[in-house]
Amino acid sequence: MSSVEITVEEHIATVVLNRPEAMNAVDPEMRGLLHAAWDRIRHDDDIWVVIITGAGDRSFCTGSDLKKTLPSGESAAQQLLAGPPGAGSLIANLNTDKPLIAAINGYALGGGMELALACDIRICADNAQFALPEVRVGSMPGAGGSVRLPRYVGRSDAMLMLLTGARTDATEALRIGLVSKVVAADQLLTEARAIAQAIAANAPLSVRAVKRMVRQGEDMPLSHAIDVERSLFGLLFNSEDRIEGRKAFAEKRKPEFKSR
């Protein structure tokens, strides 16, 4: 049975893809559950940071379940223009200013790797394996893999993965900058939680402004990006949290941020 588990503690949401018997492959039921999870993350004010991982110790996510996602018979026009935008992508509507941390345990293949690429910070267990193998089955990445990967690692490294479909281990993933850290499998969630806590301790609006600036700034000329950064800085200038941060610093105490 497919499920997506969400727990929220101290403003940190942990999302677990829970279909370990199928290597956490995404079938149509799980796809709908993931879309609902992304909606909740966007709208739940109690969530400030998100950790995404897979159940078990063998797989983060192996992408779409090919046995249950055969071609539908719809025309290309129907798939592209009818129904909700991005309905076929497991990361459709995963669009938020809240930081996303991928804790990659085992295989991150196809759409599973694309899910990891959609996150802001990626750490992995030492048994992790990464691949975008779509060319091996007559397809191509359809959830941002061929767009994001060349932006996040060197072009040659990205093309090597994309054109061969070959797997990359944790050591190589760290070398090319695909992940930030490699840790022992039994320490993965502990490390992810420590990163999430460090982020959640900061002013939420400031964190979201930084993420938005980084994402939007990637596509802007430098001078334009600096102007937009200054505008966002100005928006935060008189926020309650910014004032609280300065009071707490002066009073040598921990700030109590309210996301206001």
Image (tube, grey):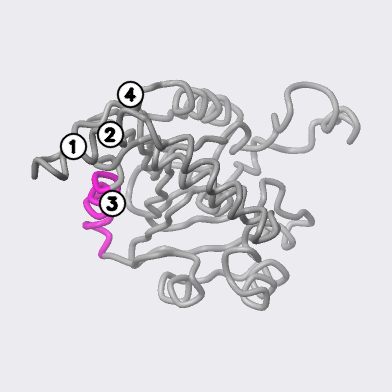
Answer with mark 3 or mark 2, whichever residue precedes in sequence: 3
Question: Helix, strand, or loop for circle 1?
Answer: helix
Q: Nearer the viewer, mark 4 or mark 1?
A: 1
Residue topped by disc 3? 195
Specify start and end residues of the magenta stretch as a single range: 184-198
Residue type for callout 2: Ile
Q: Residue 5 sits in which quadrant?
A: top left
Q: Nearer the viewer, mark 1 or mark 3?
A: 1
In the picture, measured across the screen, residue 88 lies left or right of residue 249, that is right
Asked if the residue at tag 2 contacts the one at tag 3, i.e. Cβ–Cβ closer than 8 Å, the answer is no
Answer with mark 4 or mark 1, whichever residue precedes in sequence: 4
Residue topped by disc 2? 243
Residue topped by disc 1? 247
Which residue ends up furthest to the left in the rendered image? 252
Answer with mark 4 or mark 2, whichever residue precedes in sequence: 4
Marks 4 and 3, Cα distance to the nearest angstrom?
18 Å
Above or below, comparing residue 258 to residue 168 in the picture = above
Q: Nearer the viewer, mark 3 or mark 2?
A: 2
Residue type for callout 3: Ile
Q: Residues within 10 Å of mark 3 (few under 14, many from 20)?
A: some
Q: Is residue 85 magenta?
A: no
Give the residue drawn at x 35%, y 25%.
260
Q: Position of residue 147 (x, y in %)?
A: 69, 57
In the picture, measured across the screen, residue 230 lies left or right of residue 181, that is right
Residue type for callout 4: Asp
Q: Residues within 10 Å of mark 2 (few under 14, many from 20)?
A: some
Q: Residue 138 sits in which quadrant?
A: bottom right
- Quadrant in the picture for the N terminus: top left
Q: Is residue 193 magenta?
A: yes
Q: Residue 65 sits in which quadrant?
A: top right
Marks 4 and 2, Cα distance to the nearest angstrom?
21 Å
Camera-nearest residue between 233 and 136? 233
